[in-house]
Image: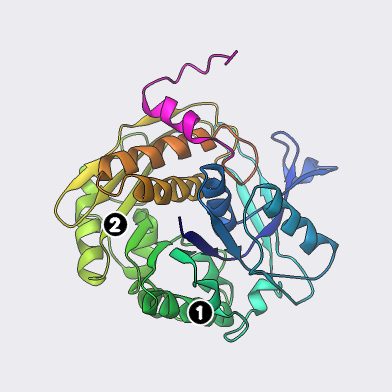
Amino acid sequence: MKKVITFGEIMLRLTPQGFLRFSQANNFDVVYGGGESNVAVSLANYGIPVDFVSRLPDNDIGHCALIEMRKRAVGTEQIVFGGDRLGIYFLETGAVSRGSKVVYDRANSAMSEIAPGMMDWKSIFSDAQWFHWTGITPAISQSAADTCLEAVKMASEMGLTISTDLNYRAKLWKYGGDREDIMTELTSYCDIILGNEEDAEKHFGIRPEGLDITMHGEHVKAEAFLSVCEQMMKKFPKAKKVITTLRGSISASHNSWAGVLYDGARMFKSREYQITDIVDRVGGGDSFMGGLIYGLLQYPEDNQKALDFAVAASCLKHTIKGDANLVTVAEVEKLMGGDASGRVAR
């Protein structure tokens, strides 16, 4: 099987232990993660050959991030070194009615200073079938956006399937780039588009008909998002599938979770999971994307099964501390089959 290539920034994540607030913390738990590296880890866990492409500083912290990818069986041969620092983000884990908080410290990171011409995309894609990027990468800097555009153009020219997770981040996009123009051009090359209602509205002004996206709660109706999918396909005619995650936020500790997939003719809906006592919701969307890519590769004629795999995989991610989803195909299929008992496997 040819490779999947993901491209983006991996960061050092620092989290107060347990549910402590930043102001209470005397030490931090350390993990490494980022949207595209998390997708790569998911795919490697499922047995899909995958390379993560990025730019890291040539220092101890950069090499720690590299080791994290290698120990998860993710290919790192295409990572380049340069710059002075690895991006950092601080996560305060919420509980019940107190939401989680993220503080970024990634200005002037090695990845933010990547530029066109640094990566040999033709060589990188020579044995690949799929390229995945997210809306986080072009939000880092203009040069990162330009490099991402360089990548999607080459991937398109070489006939790869191209996917994106739109991933709007309000705390990024600070460098003055025209977000809508940048994201519109990049997304126009995509075959598979994943996003939620906020991503579509913030990037493209596309809103679900009859739904106020400022409202949060338990009842998120899949049918309300058909109009979003239709509008997205009209705007991006190359797209073959538009997928939306449906998160109902009852509290920081209890979410409902489901998804829909639209192929231009039919909307597929997953079952809805009630995720209670959430351990870590960061990386939930990345785990969905990793599951979706796996599902579309393994079940190319079965959109429903691909969607169901993605939703079940991301449901399980909420039980795992850290950025990445460390589950197996068998565990996902067990949940897909209706076994949510959590009984000890002996």
Q: Nearer the viewer, residue 287 or 102?
A: 287
Tag 2 secondary structure? strand
Q: Position of residue 75 (x, y in %)?
A: 62, 58
Using the rendered view, name the quadrant where residue 182 is placed.
bottom left
Using the rendered view, name the quadrant where residue 340 is placed.
top left
Using the rendered view, name the quadrant where residue 51 is placed.
bottom right
Which amino acid does the dot numbered 1 rest on? Lys
Which amino acid does the dot numbered 2 rest on? Val
The image shows residue 35, relative to residue 83, as above or below, that is above
Residue at label 1? 122
Within-10-Å neighbours for mark 2: few <14, some 14–19, many 20+: many
Q: Please name the residue shown 58% across and 77% down the image.
A: 141
Q: Is residue 128 visible?
A: yes
Q: Position of residue 134 (x, y in %)?
A: 48, 64
Q: Nearer the viewer, residue 177 or 143?
A: 143
Q: Position of residue 280 (x, y in %)?
A: 59, 38
130 to the left or right of 76: left
Residue at label 2? 242
Pick out the residue farthest to the bottom.
117
Q: Please name the residue shown 19% across and 60% down the image.
A: 230
332 in magenta: yes
Of tags 2 and 1, which is closer to the observer? 1
Q: Is residue 173 visible?
A: no
Q: Nearer the viewer, residue 310 or 174?
A: 310
Labelled pair 2, 1 in contact (Cβ < 8 Å): no
* The C terminus: image quadrant: top right
Q: Nearer the viewer, residue 285 or 178?
A: 285
258 to the left or right of 26: left
Q: Please name the residue shown 62% across and 46% down the image.
A: 323
9 to the left or right of 29: left
Q: Which residues are magenta?
A: 326-346
Q: Earlier in the sequence, mark 2 or mark 1?
A: 1
